């Protein structure tokens, strides 16, 4: 990055939030609830970020998953007990081989009920609590109103709430450099689309910009993928700059830095940024998947219950091919898909557009698709960023896809569907709650210390 010029503007705030997706918007609204002045720096033109691609989030012991509605899950650590916080905690940590911090999981899972209620208090509507495949019914899917996308509708409502509460947001503006003094953060240098440098003086900075999914060089460098074709699904702005910005300020990277939410075959040329197309849905059906040697490498219906597991199976091949026939396509039109997925979900759905897309694609050659990265900056249970010695960098936080430490080698969709979306919101709130706890000089509050 070129050296920044002198700031043309200085803003004072109690907290500077980098990113206006689920994590950043949650942090901004939480800050407003606590009477803190937040400034949001966002590279896109409005609220949303990669969170618009989500459909629901994990919720445990909420009003939707309590009492008679509390699931009992055969795949749980304790399959005869209700699938509440304790059971889900042990189940997920076992799935991740106890690589993540149990304290981080406890902090996250333990406030899920509170966060679901908090979201509803800020205008978010949940349509239902459902399962993915044979998993537990804890996926709290959002109402999508009259919009096509549940996540898009969520962020439209959430962003409007942040505006209503008086959040100052600078859109089309990039976070460039953390300002450090005596080992602690005191603000951020940002740059708008015209090249103007903005200095934000704030005693707290929280980073939540969506990870590094679109930076293939970064991803190949830190993940285990062997597949020569990988395909990010979702927003195109996730390049890892803010993860690197934190590292330049002394942040350590969490174990599992290359953890990725792999999701299985994506037909090359047929899908660019979304997973709601019929061409994508056809490619992940349990037909026949072959690798570069013409070998079948996994049980294809794995995708239905555990898309992350199927994605890892594809990740470990050099090249992948998904084979299906016109007979399959006609069956899907008449009877619906073999595995229910997104828009491609009901009998009687014509697949003319899918055929057109697939004809324009590279035959049955697929890349390994992934929704997001989910391993990054090392944080503790309060989402405070840690340095290489495991010490807290004062007043610097990370959440959502920028933070690591929540997963082992893969995403836990079978045991906590929507855990990454839930983590985005929960981590944004955890950061602000912790920042409020400690007395410090607050720039915006005219030198008054926080109560």
Image (cartoon, grey):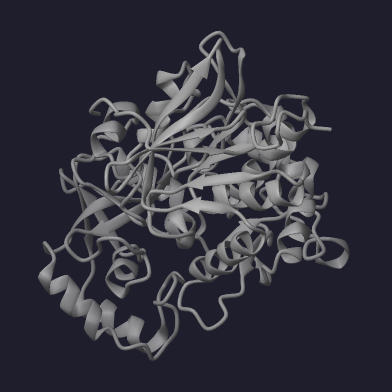
From this view, report whether residue 431 is shown above or below residue 125.
Answer: above
Residue 83 at what x, y percent from top left? Answer: 77, 51
From this view, report whether residue 51 is shown above or below residue 401.
Answer: below
From this view, report whether residue 239 is shown above or below residue 302.
Answer: above
Q: Is residue 267 at least partly visible in the picture?
A: yes
Count of residue discs? 0
Q: Quadrant of the C terminus?
A: top right
Q: Would you identify the image quadrant in which residue 164 lies?
A: bottom right
Q: Is residue 416 at least partly visible in the picture?
A: no
Residue 93 at what x, y percent from top left? Answer: 65, 34
Q: Would you identify the image quadrant in which residue 125 lies?
A: bottom right
The residue drawn where x is 72% and y is 43% is 109
Q: Quadrant of the N terminus?
A: top left
Residue 396 at what x, y percent from top left? Answer: 58, 27
Residue lying furthest right in this view? 67
The residue drawn where x is 67% and y is 59% is 165
Judged left or right of residue 107, residue 82 is right
Q: Looking at the picture, tell me which residue is in the foreground, 175 or 287.
A: 175
The residue drawn where x is 17% and y is 48% is 294
From this view, report whether residue 438 is shown above or below residue 237.
Answer: above
The residue drawn where x is 66% and y is 53% is 29
Judged left or right of residue 102, residue 326 is left
Q: Looking at the picture, tell me which residue is in the foreground, 84 or 170.
A: 170
Q: Looking at the picture, tell me which residue is in the foreground, 69 or 221.
A: 221
Residue 277 at what x, y percent from top left? Answer: 32, 72
């Amino acid at each position: 990055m070129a050296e920044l010029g002198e700031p043309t503007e200085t803003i004072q705030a109690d907290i500077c939030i980098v990113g206006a997706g689920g994590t950043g918007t949650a942090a901004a609204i939480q800050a407003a609830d606590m009477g803190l002045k937040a400034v949001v720096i966002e590279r896109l033109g409005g609220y949303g970020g990669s969170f618009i691609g989500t459909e629901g989030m994990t919720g445990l012991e909420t009003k939707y998953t309590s009492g008679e509605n509390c699931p009992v899950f055969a795949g749980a650590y304790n399959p005869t007990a209700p699938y509440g916080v304790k059971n889900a905690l042990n189940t997920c940590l076992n799935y991740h081989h106890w690589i993540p911090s149990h304290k981080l999981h406890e902090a996250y899972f333990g406030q899920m009920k509170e966060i679901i209620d908090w979201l509803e208090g800020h205008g978010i509507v949940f349509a239902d609590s459902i399962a993915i495949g044979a998993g537990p019914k804890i996926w709290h899917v959002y109402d999508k109103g009259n919009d096509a996308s549940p996540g898009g509708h969520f962020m439209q409502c959430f962003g409007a709430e942040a505006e209503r509460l008086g959040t100052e947001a600078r859109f089309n503006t990039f976070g460039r450099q953390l300002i450090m003094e005596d080992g602690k953060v005191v603000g951020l240098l940002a740059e708008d689309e015209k090249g103007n440098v903005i200095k934000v003086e704030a005693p707290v900075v929280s980073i939540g910009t969506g990870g590094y999914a679109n930076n293939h060089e970064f991803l190949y460098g830190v993940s285990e993928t062997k597949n020569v074709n990988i395909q990010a699904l979702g927003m195109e702005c996730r390049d890892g700059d803010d993860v690197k910005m934190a590292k330049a300020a002394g942040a350590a990277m969490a174990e599992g830095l290359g953890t990725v939410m792999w999701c299985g075959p994506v037909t090359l040329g047929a899908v660019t940024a979304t997973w709601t197309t019929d061409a994508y849905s056809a490619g992940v059906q349990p037909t026949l998947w072959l690798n570069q040697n013409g070998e079948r490498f996994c049980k294809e219906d794995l995708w239905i219950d555990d898309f992350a597991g199927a994605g890892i199976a594809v990740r470990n091949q050099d090249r992948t091919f998904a084979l299906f026939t016109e007979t399959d396509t006609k069956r899907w039109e008449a009877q619906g898909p073999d595995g229910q997925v997104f828009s491609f979900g009901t009998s009687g759905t014509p697949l003319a557009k899918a055929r057109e897309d697939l004809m324009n694609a590279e035959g049955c050659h697929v890349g390994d698709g992934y929704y997001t990265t989910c391993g990054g900056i090392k944080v503790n249970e309060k989402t405070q960023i840690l340095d290489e010695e495991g010490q807290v960098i004062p007043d610097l936080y990370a959440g959502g896809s920028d933070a690591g430490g929540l997963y082992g080698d893969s995403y836990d969709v079978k045991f906590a569907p929507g855990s990454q979306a839930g983590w985005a919101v929960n981590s944004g709130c955890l950061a602000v709650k912790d920042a409020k706890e400690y007395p410090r000089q607050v720039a915006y509050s005219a030198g008054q210390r926080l109560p």
